[in-house]
Image: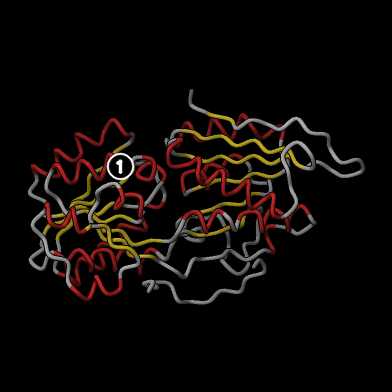
Amino acid sequence: MAINIARRRFIAAVGGAAAMWPILAQAQEPGLKRWRIACVLPGSPETIKPLATALEQRLAEFGYQDGRNIKLVTRIVPPQPEIVEQAITALLSDIDILTVLGTVAGVAAKKLAPQMPTVFCAVGAPVEIGLVESLAHPGGNMTGITFEAAIEAYGRRLQILKEIVPHLGRVGVLRASGDANVKISMSALERAALQLGITLSAFDVHSADDLDGAFGDIHKSGMQAVIVVAGALVYANVRRISELALQAHLPSCTAFREAVIAGGLVSIGPDLIDMIRQVPVYLDKIMRGAKPADLPVQEPTRFDLYLNLKTAAALGLTIPPSLLATADEVIE
């Protein structure tokens, strides 16, 4: 049974710094425009390639094939804002549509390509950070799929940690500097922490090189658990973050199930593969003449709960039966 955080219903009109996937050398169908689509996907090859594959497969289901009736260029780039901006800038002169993954890339696309039709995926709070006017009526050059409703999601994550660690009083918040999602997520966390009697302390990282030092600081500061703000940088480093949390003997909660599979304690969040498979729905509509301004933004309503019992045992924790009963997957 899935845990549903966002139940609100929105109107929907739609059911080395870079690596480039190869372009298939196939003939273009005569008489048809070959749309040029660029996908900028910040992260690591390990975490991003399954998403890129899902995107290509879904495009094929709509009848679009790279080298025949579209030109598709996918770039996997490190999740630092300046590198993402460089990747987008390098592509703009030779594309018709831009697709981006994550808040950092969404913000960069809005800044650098305010007129380019753009489909985003897994962006946190696109209204609040200025990407669209509203979810139902984007009103500009961008539309797509949000990642979560931050207020509800982060409140639930903190509550789950409190259920697992009843005497929880101090929580470290690991967050990526330069990610526009951080401010909104922190506001939601602070609101929930006040209600739960928890004190939060923030620890910023700019790149993967900062993670070891950040966890050292979290441990020295006497934090009893760590909650990770969702974003491209942490998604690219879910395995290392889970390892460091366990080494520091810290219960961890993230938005990504990959973290729990890698040894983290608990995660609750949407399925990124399912989300990115919705991107071609938008691309198809735009290529058929629709404008991003008129295509409502979608928000996921299904959030899955993952628990790692092996990690819980290593930390000397007992998962409450109520959480076990509602978990979508329990790793033993």
Residue 19 falls in which quadrant of the image?
top right
Residue 185 falls in which quadrant of the image?
bottom left
Residue situated in front as seen by the camera: 52 or 166: 52
- Counting from the top left corner in percent of width and height, residue 95 is at 71, 37
Is 307 positioned to the left or the right of 116 in the image?
left
Image quarter in which the N terminus is found = bottom left
Residue type at numbered disc 1: Arg
Residue situated in front as seen by the camera: 200 or 68: 68
Is 296 positioned to the left or the right of 1 in the image?
right
Image quarter in which the C terminus is found = bottom left
- Say if 324 sits above or below 172 in the image: below
Is 2 positioned to the left or the right of 93 in the image?
left
* Residue ID at (13%, 68%): 197
Residue found at the far front of this picture = 332
- Counting from the top left corner in percent of width and height, residue 90 is at 61, 29
* Residue ID at (12%, 65%): 318
Residue 307 falls in which quadrant of the image?
bottom left
- Neighbor class of circle 1 (other Cα within 10 Å; few <14, some 14-19, many 20+) is some
* Residue ID at (62%, 70%): 12
- Counting from the top left corner in percent of width and height, residue 323 is at 24, 71
- Say if 102 sits above or below 211 in the image: below
Residue found at the far right of this picture = 31
Q: List the residue tagged with mark 1.
A: 239
